[in-house]
Image (spheres, rainbow, N blue to C red):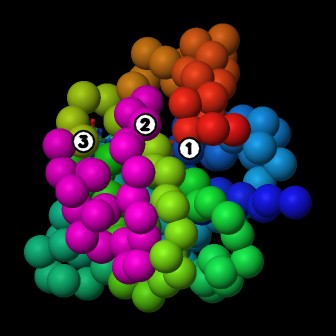
Amino acid sequence: MSKDLIIFYSSTNYNRKVAEIVAVKTSADLFEVKPVKAYDTNMWVAWDVAKREREENNLPKLATDYPDMSKYDRIFFGGPSWGFTISNPLQTFLQTADFASKRVYPWVTFYDHDENYLSDLKKQAKNAEVQPLLELTMGVLNNRADLGETIENWLKKIGE
Ligand SMILES: Cc1cc2nc3c(=O)[nH]c(=O)nc-3n(C[C@H](O)[C@H](O)[C@H](O)COP(=O)(O)O)c2cc1C
């Protein structure tokens, strides 16, 4: 039987919600990436820290390990847009992770800016076949029925 893996990071639980819905619909395993030190849940306080980390080339250390991706058929990869691109904890994860030539299905959550997310992911995800990006804005994320339907349609399109 085919098996999928969901890798996600979530600071304020939007991505956790998405990951859990995808897990129920696909029976995939869940892998949560966690930084050693959690970011403030206030976006602007968190951005002050995250921006400085980027400027100083000092991405956060992770409290979590790395999954063996070779065991899986497909990898889902989800997280928030931070400063138009991949969140700092997932950037740390990507420095070490090896996607083992698997197809990677990314999603992103954001308010209105994720311009660099997909191109940066294609650059940073080692040995990944990165597929089109599912973009989830707050309007959809805050409406349970819309979110469920959007994820359902996405999974249908990618052959679930
Ligand atoms: C440090 C930080 C930077 C962010 N930068 C952006 C951004 O550039 N564009 C945007 O639309 N939203 C931005 N946001 C909003 C996040 O995308 C939003 O909080 C996130 O999608 C929520 O996901 P989560 O609850 O799983 O953490 C930022 C949030 C944080 C904490």
CB of mark 3 near ligand 1 (< 8 Å) = yes
* Mark 3 surroundings within 10 Å by alpha-carbon count, few (fewer than 14), some (14 through 19), many (20 or more): some
CB of mark 1 near ligand 1 (< 8 Å) = yes
**Which quadrant does the C terminus fall into?**
top right
Three-letter code, disc 3: Asp
Label 3 – label 2 distance at C-alpha: 11 Å
Please give the name of the residue rendered at 49% of the width and 83% of the height, measured from the top-left corner: 98
CB of mark 2 near ligand 1 (< 8 Å) = no
Specify which label sits upstream in the sequence, 3 or 1: 1
Image quadrant where residue 122 sits: bottom left
Residue identified by numbered label 3 = 114
Image height check: is 8 above or below 37? above
Q: Which mark is residue 15?
A: 1
- Helix, strand or loop at label 3? It is loop
Please state the horizontal and vertical placement of residue 119, each as a whole percent of the image.
Answer: 21, 56
Please give the name of the residue rendered at 73% of the width and 77% of the height, measured from the top-left corner: 71
Q: Nearer the viewer, residue 94 or 27?
A: 27
Task: Tally the numbered discs.
Answer: 3
**Which quadrant does the N terminus fall into?**
bottom right
Three-letter code, disc 1: Asn
* Mark 1 surroundings within 10 Å by alpha-carbon count, few (fewer than 14), some (14 through 19), many (20 or more): many
- Helix, strand or loop at label 2? It is strand
Front tag of 1 and 2: 2
Please indicate, yes or no, whether residue 108 appears anywhere in the rendered image: no
Q: Which mark is residue 134?
A: 2
Label 1 – label 2 distance at C-alpha: 12 Å
Please indicate, yes or no, whether residue 59 appears anywhere in the rendered image: yes
Which residues make up the magenta segment? 115-136
Please state the horizontal and vertical placement of residue 94, each as a whole percent of the image.
Answer: 40, 76
